[in-house]
Structure formats: structure tokens, C-alpha cells
Amino acid sequence: MKPGSITSLVARWWPWRGRHLVIGLPYAWLLLFFLAPFGVVLSFSLSQMGSIRPDSLIRYVDGALQLTLRGSNFSNLLSDGLYLNAYASSLRLAFITTMGCLLLGYPFAYFMARAKPVHQPILLMLVMAPFWTSFLLRVYAWKLLLGEGGWLGALLQGAGLDAPLLWLGLIEAPGKYMHTPFSLMLGMLYSYLPFMILPLYAALSKMDLRLIEAAYDLGATPWQTFWRITVPLSRGGIAAGCMLVFIPAVGEFVIPELLGGPRTLMIGKVLWEEFFSNNDWPMACAVAVLLLAIIMLPLAWFNRVQDREASA
Amino acid sequence: MNKFLKPHRWMQVCGRQLAHAWLFGGYLFLYLPIGALVLFSFNDSPVPSLWRGITLRWYSKLMADGEMLAALGLSLKLAAMSATSSVLLALLAAYALVKIPRFRGRGLFASMVNAPLVMPEVIVGLALLLLLVGMQGALGFPSRGLGTLLIGHALLGMAYATVVLQARLRELPAALEEAALDLGARPAQVFRLVTLPMILQSLGSAWLLTFSLSLDDVVMSAFLSGPGSTTLPLVIFSRARMGVDPSVNAMATLIIVIVAGVITAAALYAVYAERRRHREISAAWRP
């Protein structure tokens, strides 16, 4: 065989092989390290803690394979008020965070998108820059500002915000802001705000401004135009922003640990403690499975909204 | 800008004031903690409530802090390795998702690529650790340490890098690659000579993003680290749990200065490259 024919053979096969490599390598990686682990979690959640490891589900007893599934972790989960409270308070905190980010972030993204086009790249860069600086350090920094005698605390007290915060139950004593629901919410809002602003900005900046012109021409007031044209057209951005905030916020661990009070009950923390302190792997897995199930609901809704946007 | 956007003059003035105030307040909120970190790293008092003048002693204390420096070294190594692997994986994944419209299991692939973006990290960390522990039981490797940390960080970073690269690949004009194919280039050549040079800048920014994500990660690292492989965020996290530590402020300031420097340099380079490209295009245009 001439060497030339071999090269032509390789050349003919290359696209096929290249294509399989391009898809296959990341696919295999994700199947092994992302999907398979969830299978392990699911199987552990139906098992029970042995002496060091959870008992395996399938055992070889008396010459036959025996499958033992235990629902005890889940029945514990659903009957113990501690777990249910933790789920409820995590969902509540995530919801409040999402709404707060939307209220702060929507006008912010709107004004960004309507700023002079020359300024927009800089404004966008300034929102994205905190992503590159450590999230952990930025959360920690609130300790400096809100802690005992912190400057921001003094400012808040000076502005007379103690009374409304006390009334809302966000702080327990005047002048004490750190390790309260207030510091926790502030930290959550702060950390997740850029995740809300970016998709909103993306949606608002590519909007067709002629539609607004048309609304004005047809006699709509600015207020009507905003609610009936701008907001519906940015629905995709709103949905994406809410997802990017809500879902990670439900399982957040670092912010409650650093800024929350001693009585803050979050499901991420419960999972952490089941695993690291109680060393009860099956229970930690059961907590994770239920959390996943809860998260799937808004995720499914989001996928539907996105499909509708894509087909529209 | 557009006269039709502003129907009433008084509203226009009010609106602009409100816009400026809102943007200013928002940026103040975003940057206040960063400013506080820098400022308090120079404070000659260990408690942030007291300002006692400027000092550099926290920096000299940091330089003598063996635990922190060892963790920093490990974290930098880990971040460089995981950023490189996640960008390579993400390049393949993004290329597959953008350029290959139909293949078996595409839907599952797309959702697996994006899921780590929103999935709470406690779940991903726990799941991956349990798998790796199982693998170790069955195969004898990998033991918890740098290797397991690398897998976890590369997994997280891949999701972010794919978003960046996918966006860039999507906006590339298909005509250039088609032209190269028409002129007889093989797909691999098209990729190397046409596609790759055009996405180089995005590869750089994806690398920087995943590098800083890895340098920052607490939850995944807590699950996957083993004895003797404590990363910088784990050290900072355990100290921050105790309270305020001026050495952490000093470390934070150093990180912020380096990151700001790199971002500024990258942005300036992007502007420069864009100008040069314009110059070259207009030079080529001349008859």
C-alpha cells in the first residue's frame, strides 16, 4: 500500500474520530464525576451506617443476592421537626434573597442598559469584577463592617434604623448587627446580587427600543410602557436571574456559617453536620436527595420558560 | 440618546437623577466590603472598630505565617492545574454543543454541563466525595488530597468556562470556517488556524475565571481535601469563623491587588489588540 493512501484514509476517518473525541471526552468526564455521584448518593440514602462505611444495598447472603432498601432515613427526615424546619427556613431565606435581589437588581440593570453606550462596557465590567475577587473574602469583610463597633453599624444606628430592624425581628438588640438575621440577609443579598444583575442586563440591553417608541406613539404613559412592554420582554432575564440566585441560595453554607446567628438553621449546614460531625453518611445523603427533589421543581419551571422564550 | 424615550422633560430630569443615584448606591454596596478589607489591612489596631493609624505589621506577620503561606502555595498550584483542565474540557464541550447540532444524548449532555452552575455546592461536593471514596475502596486510588481536589475544582470550573466559551463560539461568523473548509482545510486545521486564534481571548478570560473560582472555593474543598492538603480558603474560612483576623485582611488585600492588576492588564491588552486589528484591517483596505 502506498503511504499516500494511508494518509487519505486517515484524512477520511479524522472527522469521524475527531468528532467522537470532542463529544466523548467531556461526556465521559461528566457521566463519571457528575452523574454517577448522584447514583451513589441515592443508593446511600436508602442504606444505613455500618461501622465505618454505609452498608451496601446488595449483599450476598446464603448463596443469593439480597437487596435491602431502607426508608428509615427518609421517614426520620419527614418526622423530625428539625429537618423540616431547616428546609423551610432555607427556602424562606432563598425566597427573600431572590426577591430582594430582583428589587435591587432590576432597576440597576435597567439603568445600566439605558446608560450611554460608551459607558456600558465599563459599568458591566464593574459588576463582573467582584466575581474575580474572592467571594469568601467579600463575605468575611462584612464582619469588619458590621461587627462590634463596626463603622457601618455605627452609621445604621446613627440613621435610626435600629427601631425598624428590631420591629422586623431582624436584630435582637439595638446596636448588635453581626450574627443576626439582618447580617445574614445582607450577606446573601450582597453575594447574589451580581448573579441577578447580569442576566437582567443581558435581556434589557438587547431589547428593541422601537417597541417602546411604538407604545408612546399609541399614547401609553411611561409607567404603562414599563409594565406592559419592558417587563414582559425581559421575562427571560428575570427567570434566569431568579434561578441563578434561588437555587444556590437554598443550599448555601458559607454565608450562614460566617454571618448567621447561632440559631440560624439552614439545610446546607444540617447536611454538613450530618456528614462531618455525626458521621452519618446515609442521613446526609437523604438530606441531599430531598433537597435535590425540592430544587427540581423551580428548575423544571425555568426550563419551560426558557423553551417558550426560545420558540417565541 | 433617543428622544422618544423621554416624553416629559421633568420626568427626564428626575429619571436621570434616580438612575445615577441607584447605580451609585449599587456600586457602593458592591465595593464597600472590598474597600473595607484593603483599608483595615493597614489599621494599626487588631479590632476594626478602632482606627489607630497606618501600619504594615499585618503584612510582616503574614510573611511569617507558615500555615497561611503553605496553603497559598498549594492553592495557587491547584488553581493553575484545575483552571487548565477545566478550560480544556470546556473547550471540547462548548465546541460540541455549538458546532455539532445533533448527536445522541445531546440534551443530557447540555444539562450536565450547565447543572453545576446552580446546583448547591454541598450536594455536588458530598456526591463527588462519596464516589471517590467508593472508587478508592474498589481501585485503591485516588486518595483524598490534591488529586481529588483537582477533580472537584475542574468539574466546577468546567461549567463556568463552558458558558464563556459557548457564548464566544456562538458569535463567531460561520463564514470564515466554511471558507477554510472550502479551501481544502481539514476540520482539525480549521480549528487550529481559524477557530482557535479567534477564541484565544475568551480562553484567557475563562482560564482566569476558573483560576479565581478555584482559589476561592470552600465547600468543595472541605469535602475533598485530605490531611496535609489544606487550601487557602479553608484556612481563611476556619479563621473567619473564629472572628476577625488582620492577617486575613492583609492576605485579602494582596489577592485583590493582584487580581485587579491582572484584570486591568487583560482589559488594556484587549483594547490594544482591538485597535491593532482595526489598524491592520484599515491598512489592508488601502488600495
Image (cartoon, grey):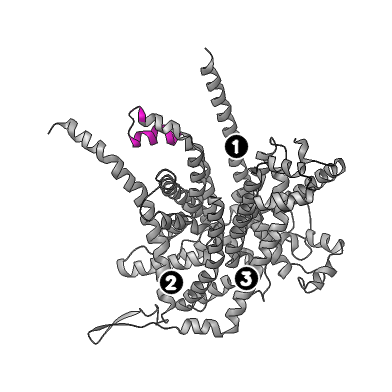
Residue A91 is labelled as 3
Instruction: Name the residue furthest front.
Output: A218
Label 1 crowd (10 A; few <14 / some 14-19 / many >=20):
some
Which dot, 1 or 3, sits closer to the camera? Answer: 3
Read off the chain for label 2: A
Q: Residue B171 or B162: which is nearer the viewer?
A: B171
A263 up-or-down from A109: above or below: below
For image coordinates 52% across by 62% down, the residue present is B119
Res. B157 in view: yes
- Mark 1, secondary structure of its residue: helix
B187 in the magenta segment: yes
The residue carrying mark 1 is B267
Whether residues under marks 2 and 3 lie with C-beta atoms below 8 angstroms apart, the answer is: no
Circle on res. B211: none
Q: According to the image, label 2 marks what residue?
A: A41
Cα gap from disc 1 to disc 3, whole angstroms = 39 Å
Report how far apart the C-alphas of labels 2 and 3 lie in the structure: 22 Å
Res. A257 image quadrant:
bottom right
Image location (x, y in percent) of residue A154: 82, 61
Q: Say which amino acid is labelled 3.
A: Leu
Q: Quadrant of the N terminus of chain A?
A: top left
Depth check, mark 1 against mark 2: the one in front is: 2
Q: Secondary structure at mark 3?
A: helix
| Magenta segment, prevailing SS (helix, strand or loop) | helix
Range shown magenta: B182-197
**As drawn, which residue projects farthest toward the left?**
A1
